[in-house]
Image (cartoon, rainbow, N blue to C red):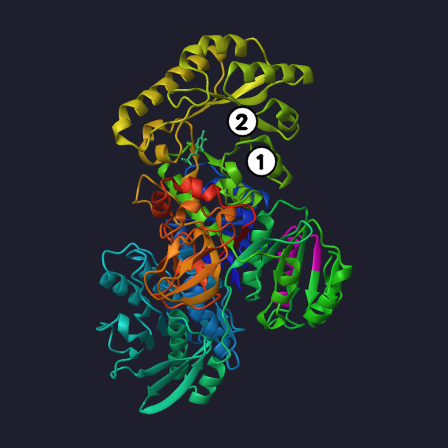
Amino acid sequence: MYTISDISEIVVPKRSIIVYHKSIIQNLIYDTRKIVNAETGLFFALINRRDGHEFIMDAYSKGIRNFVLQNDFQQELILPDANVLWVADTFLALQAVAETQRMKFKSPVLGITGSNGKTIVKEWLFQLLSPEYKIYRSPKSYNSQLGVALSLWELNEQYNFAIIEAGISEVGEMEKLQKMIKPTHGVLTNIGVAHKEGFQSKEEKIAQKLKLFTDAEVLVYPKKYLEQIYMPSQIYKFAWGEDESCQLEVYSLKKEGDQATLVSLCFSRQFFTVKIPFVDQASIENAISCIAVMITFGYDFKTIADRIATLQPMEMRLELKKGKHNTSIIDDSYSNDLVALQIALDFLKQQKQNSRKVLILSDIPGVQLHDEKSISKLKRLVAASGLTDLIFIGPILSQLEAQFSLPTASYSDTKSFIDGFKHIDYSNSTILIKGARDYHFEQISKRLVAKSHDTILEINLNALEHNLNIYRGLLPVGVKLMAMVKAFSYGSGSFEIANLLQFNHVDYLTVAFADEGVDLRNGGITLPIVVMSPDENAFDAIVHHKLEPEIYSFRVLNSFLRYLLQQGLKDFPVHIKVDTGMHRLGFMPEEVDELLAILKNQDAMKVQSVFSHLASAGNAVDNAFTENQIHLLDVFTTKLKQELGYSFIRHIAATSGIDLWPSAYFDMVRLGIGLYGIDMDRDDLPVREVSVLKTNVTQIKELTANETVGYNRAGMLQRASRTATIKIGYADGYDRRFGNGVGKMSINGQLVSTIGNICMDMCMLDVTDIDVNEEDEVIVYPDIKEAALAIGTIPYELLVNISQRVKRVYFYE
Ligand SMILES: *Cc1c(COP(=O)(O)O)cnc(C)c1O
């Protein structure tokens, strides 16, 4: 346990005000939206994309009384009865606290790094070693500078083994992680070539990653990625691979059926065989890494083989899906511990679509009845989470029911819950399912989630958040950001996307039509929402739901004005659109006087913003045209501002403008396609793919030369061929022009082409040259820019055409 004085000794402040030396510190807080137990919280004002110092008063009003701030912070602070430490760098201070906690831990600490497979190896080792050790592992993919610090803070003497994941993306980061984690044992999973991380070369990347193991006693690594490794000689280097010089030699790999692989291994001149219950290469490598670790910890071959045979695939992400009876289901049933629970509850808090919020929770491995510390933490998490109903499953939690003030139902096991299921009404709620693996909560989620067809659109909410931050990073301080969520957020979703944008404090949302805005309001979105096409028959809905119309012509201006006057409304926010060259909608620049005459003569509406749209910002040949558009908006708004006598927001830049035209930022930008991970103008921005359209192979056929495939016999086989039929067709939005070889998809990382015409609900692929099984996953657009080009369109169209019958599944890591 730490007091604020202990913390002060660790962070060595330059200046401090300590009013209560004995204040107990139990939680490290860096985000005021995630405050759980304020009295024992210590707030670090970190400087990231946002300056944490802006949130000091928010933290204070939520009950935080312990602060670590950075000393160059100027503002006079009035925080009565608070302890405040001023340090040179709040981030380093947080890491120093984590490091201190780590150094108190005397048991083995296994550090894992690599390009892929870190999280799965961590989770598998947790399963494999759990019978002998009480293991702490870093939650989810908490592997960054911040994530690792927060993970280490949770280490304590209840455990006698720790597994910590470390991830880096640039030079210089691993030293800091090593300093905190100080692994005694190490695993390098693999080194990818696919995605370029922030390194000059593969060698540099490897050298940087290896720094994690500077002080380790043992390092397990795959030989094929590191022919020569230069590591301090005190480290016992345990290589595995096909090479005879490896400590663990992989003698042969043999597929057994289509579910398992038999691996013959040789260690210390003894042969043994392990059955790995997977066939894909990544899983086999990850499993061998685990076998190697088990050998270094002295396990015998039989125990290793028995346990490896029980490994299971792992859904490591939290998923948000549409449930039956108008529910939203958050499925997070791969692990259950208090830290993972807190992450899931934070995500639940962001969800505003239903006021009823239910947690279905299993017993938490390692938490016993008398474990007061953990149980009181659980109570605090539940109290801070906005839940309305609790369902406990398991012998321990069901005895604690009386200690929770919310309506709580308890069941001794998953089966008795499912048996009683028919009698429970969950409609119109958001339900978080959080269970330990042994409780098989997938059976619960199967019952709650709406039935799906095989084709899904997966939406990565972390990537969306990441992209938002990339574009924010380009904007000078003070420029606002409007997120375009028209057309179902470019095909990716409604409140699911808006909730995340709202949580991340974008300034405005924009939809095309009023009903899209109404859907967002019904989904609990409170941000200002602009409607681009405000039809006259939608005025009621606009006013009733506080939507803000775009006014682009005298006809719309006059009819909306008439409506407002009838309703007796004043100062209703509107957005004036100017046509500076796009020639789609908007007042012409020369209409400014006529517009002013009307605006000045009324007080029913108030101009919130005046804007225009760049027609060709991404084409250098049109630079002069773009400059003129920017100039015209400037002139128009200057005049309007002078005459109206009040100020408003001005904006013109969409994604291309943000990328290429800082002079077009004005007071706000409108981010569209870039948010969804597609940038047509710059390849230096590391935007991440947000949505992936996926389906499965339904049937495989072996055909001979000269047979034909599909309608009108358009797919003529030139050779003996194998085809795969998949369940996506033009009714799902897969354009018919992709037929006959134009469309390329990917199966198990291999590119294949369509064959024959695209059908309404299905199409066929030529898989003659690749390794494929029925039910294998198919990525429909491995490269969406290329796909769009192949049929003469743009990625926007492919995204918004993905039909609504394709189920959207959201995930958050
Ligand atoms: C769609 C749209 C945007 C966003 O454009 P992107 O190219 O997707 O960033 C911005 N402004 C207006 C008026 C739009 O219609």
Mark number displayed over residue 556: none
Estimate the x, y position of residue 317 in percent, counting from the top left: 51, 60
Q: Badge 2 is on which residue?
A: 533
Indicate the secondary structure of the residue bearing disc 1.
helix
Please, what is the three-letter code of the amino acid marked with disc 1?
A: Glu
Give the camera-side residue of 184 and 313: 313
Q: Is residue 718 magenta?
A: no
Give the camera-side residue of 563 and 658: 563
- Residue furthest to the right: 423
Q: Is residue 645 above or below residue 321?
A: above
Mark 2 Cβ and ligand 1 under 8 Å apart = no
**Residue 23 seen by the camera:** no
Estimate the x, y position of residue 307 in percent, counting from the top left: 49, 82
Estimate the x, y position of residue 573 in percent, counting from the top left: 56, 23
What stretch of residues is rendered in magenta? 372-390
Q: Is residue 94 above or below residue 568?
A: below
Q: Residue at x 38, y 71 (%)?
A: 281
Estimate the x, y position of residue 331 in percent, counting from the top left: 58, 59
Asked whether, in this view, residue 495 is left or right of residue 120, the answer is right
Q: Is residue 388 magenta?
A: yes
Please, what is the three-letter code of the amino acid marked with disc 2?
A: Ser
Q: Badge 1 is on which residue?
A: 516
| C-alpha distance separating marks 2 and 1 | 11 Å
- Residue furthest to the bottom: 270
Instruction: Classify mark 1: residues with Cα within 10 Å, few (<14), some (14-19) or many (20+).
Output: many
Circles 2 and 1: CB distance less than 8 Å?
no
Chief SS of the magenta region: helix
Indicate the secondary structure of the residue bearing disc 2.
loop
Q: Residue at x 35, y 21 (%)?
A: 629
Q: Quadrant of residue 523?
A: top right
Instruction: Classify mark 2: residues with Cα within 10 Å, few (<14), some (14-19) or many (20+).
Output: some
Sequence-earlier tag: 2 or 1: 1
